[in-house]
Amino acid sequence: MLKKIVVYKPLPTDVEAYLRDKADVINVDPKDQAAFTAALEHADGAIGASIKITPSMIEGAKNLKALSTISVGYDQFDVDDLTRRGIVLTHTPDVLTESTADTVFALILASARRVVELAEWVKEGHWTSSIGEACFGVDVQGKTLGIVGLGRIGGAVARRAALGFRMNVLYTNRSANEQAEKEFGAKRVELDELLAQSDFVCLQVPLTPQTRGLIGANELKKMKQSAILINASRGPTVDETALVEALKNGTIRGAGLDVFEQEPLPAGSPLLAMKNVVALPHIGSATHETRHAMARNAAENLIGALDGTLTRNIVNRGVLAR
Ligand code: 8YV
């Protein structure tokens, strides 16, 4: 009998066709939580993204064997609970590394050179004579970039920084990244030293209980007054209230943000009114090519997990040992 798969995010046509060829596919809109939970009750697997899946939502899902998230981050899941239930969780690292590193660099350049602010200024008709100091930004090349969390994406950011922009790279990580040290001259330091020395502080950590609120008022105070904070990881790694204060008081120069405590960013957020903030709508991996590759990868992960042939992209390998 064909396996039943719940699809809770629209998929590219060819990816959906691939799944339909191998399984019974049911599409649901996860905003209708009752319908979503009911569909999961009969499912062997599910694929989607950007929705929290709680233990109570899968309590009745007795056949569920695999969940496939179309993302590298898996903070939407209670991984230990899934492991206890014998449900494999798969994700999509690697395919999004380069486009996400591009987004990080776009934020670095846009914040330093005030690209968004000045482009708006031109469109509003203010460019009436040759620009002066009031429109100047700060250099990126040759500066110090501090990367908090040097994994796959952090490594791709370090490569752009060192080889493309001749930046000095500092980093923190649970373990040393020998490749980045050798190839990009990256230097592993304590967080305090990274904060004190970097011109750009870039967060590249997953959201875990340990990284929630990692950058708060104390950490922002340790940064240079001329420094810029870049976050394209997860919003809650930064205490947003403390960040707003720091940006208002000139504790730091600016911020380039792709992620927020609450997404979409509420219309009343003070960040929206700040000239020294570049705010993007969580576009880290959002290119046609990468989003397609992620969907394809996630679909293959799901089929592989359901037929027991998957060997990579598994978040909770512990399930396989059971
Ligand atoms: C999106 C991401 O959140 O991969 C991640 O962890 O943050 C993103 O690419 C989204 O889930 C993509 O569908």
Image: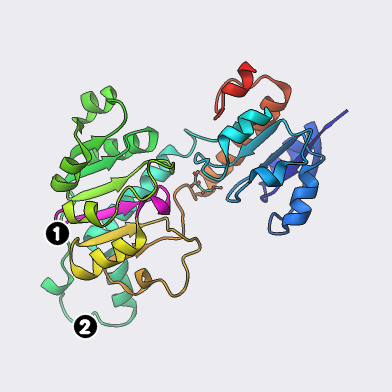
Q: Which portion, as a residue range, is magenta?
A: 223-238
225 in magenta: yes
CA–CA distance between discs 1 and 2? 31 Å
Residue 24 higher or lower than 84, as above or below: below
* Residue at the right extreme of this rendering: 1
Return the residue at label 2: 128
Q: Give the foreground label among 1 and 2.
A: 1
Q: Quadrant of residue 168?
A: top left
Residue beneath the point at 43% across and 44% down: 207
Q: Is residue 66 visible?
A: yes
What residue is rendered at 34% in x and 77% in y? 123
Q: Residue furthest top?
A: 321
Q: Amino acid at mark 1?
A: Gln
The amino acid type of the residue labelled 2 equals Thr
Residue located beneath label 1 in the image: 225
What residue is rendered at 27% in x and 41% in y? Answer: 147
Dot 2 falls on a residue whose secondary structure is: loop
Residue 249: x %, y % from top left? 20, 69
**Between 128 and 282, the one nearer to me in the picture:** 282
Q: Which mark is residue 129?
A: none
Q: Where is residue 310 shown, x and y percent of the image?
A: 63, 22
Most extreme residue toward the left, as rendered? 133
46 left or right, relative to 106: right
Label 1 lies in ligand 1 vicinity (Cβ under 8 Å): no
Residue 165 in sight here:
no
Q: Position of residue 297 (x, y in %)?
A: 59, 34
Q: Residues within 10 Å of mark 1 (few under 14, many from 20)?
A: some
Residue appearing at x 15%, y 67% in the figure: 136
* Tag 1 secondary structure: loop
Judge left or right: residue 107 versus residue 3: left
